[in-house]
Amino acid sequence: MPRHRLPGSPLVTERRRLLFVSPRFLFPANEGGKIRTSNILRHMRGGAFEIALASPAPDDTKPFAADLAAVADRFVAWPTVAPSRIGRVAALFSALPVAVSSDQSAAGSAAVRDELAVAPDLIVVDFPHAAVLLPDGALPPSAIFTHNVEAEIFERHAAVANPLWRAVWRSQARKMRRFEGETLRRFDSVIAVSARDATVLQRDYALPPVACIDTGVDLDFHRYVPPIASPRDDGGSIVFCGAMDWRANIDGIAWLMDAVWPLVLRARPAARAVVVGRNPPQTLIDAAASRGLAWTFTGYVDDVRPYVLDADVYVIPLRVGSGTRIKAFEAMAAGRPVVSTAVGIEGLAITPGTHFLAADEAPEFAAAILRLLDDAALRAGMTTAARSLLEDKFSWTQVARQFEAICLRVVDRSPR
């Protein structure tokens, strides 16, 4: 029988059957979770597991046929149903968090039950949200892949929200903390995206040791281009990339505009900013226009790389979130120096001052941006060091090897 393995993985003589259940269609891979999952599956494909991917899907998946074939041996789908505004409001009164309630699907649950009936060797659930698709009762050998500490996201939103929204976020945080704990304890193994998240999950939910993987980056796709020797004008430019219909990104960009940007303009009145990401709120666009700021909101783009390479500095001004930000590694891989808050860089094994500049308060964040704009040698040295680190430790092949090894351990230690 043919033998399959990732480079550096143990040889196996028989491929095990893996059912991988995701709450989102993975393509286009334009969000952090989709990027992480699709790259891990792509680099596991043809290895120790025969992979069946199960997820909701759009009506027409033909444009993504090559992508699906690259990540799975078989694809199982059910219709994607976008929750209505009324449905989301009604979900506020559900026992489940809104973000989880919207992933419930009778068709999805039926598809997963059918797949479980053929007894896969392992089931992996992507995000706790996907657990609402599982039947009650015992599971085959199982693992849950947690891209975040979900309750932490809501708690951090509550910490920075106005009083009215604070009550909503706190309510959702309580529901998520209960749901997250109950869900993670169902599985034989929990897989986190950083050692930091693994420690928090184990502590908060009284779990046995939580496995963890590194965050990866596609080093071929995000090829290194040396930083621009000097800003092309007296202002210089910064860029941020992220879905602008995600509350954490909206909060971060609003803070950047309100608290940080006036301090940047004092030193560089012609400074420019580009915000790359789908569905930017009209309130932010209007705020930038009313203040006469040289800010561009691109909306959705097929490829963020030209915008990243056109900038002098990449910023991650996040105050809310959890997990790890793949965008940080993508910017570093491309040769753009990064300024980030602690939340923006959380869980990544990189060193402030060497691979990026860290700042949590507005004056320090503005000063870090200006320091990089003013110092070509610093930009060059920091980006070279960051790219070298990524090449040594954080390719997706290495991360997929870690993930596959965890999956094999779950199968091997589970009684059948």
Image (cartoon, helix red, strand yellow):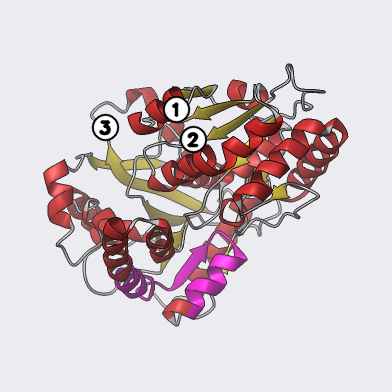
Q: Is residue 24 left or right of residue 241?
A: left
What's the magenta bit mostly, secondary-structure-wise? helix
Image spot of residue 56 (x, y percent): 27, 42
Taking the spot 40% from the left edge, 64% from the top edge, the residue there is 155
Residue nearer the viewer, 223 or 375: 375
Please tell me in which quadrant of the rendered image residue 226 appears: top right
Give the residue type at disc 1.
Ala
Image spot of residue 235 (x, y percent): 69, 23
Residue nearer the viewer, 288 or 383: 288
Name the residue furthest top.
Answer: 232
Quick one: SS at disc 1? helix
Q: Which residue is denoted by mark 1 in the rendering?
A: 66
Please say whether residue 192 is one of the residues in the magenta stretch.
yes
Mark linked to residue 70:
2
Taking the spot 82% from the left edge, 43% from the top edge, the residue there is 385
Looking at the image, is mark 3 or mark 1 earlier in the sequence?
A: 3
Q: Residues within 10 Å of mark 2 (few under 14, many from 20)?
A: some
Mark in front: 3 vs 2: 3
Can see residue 5? no
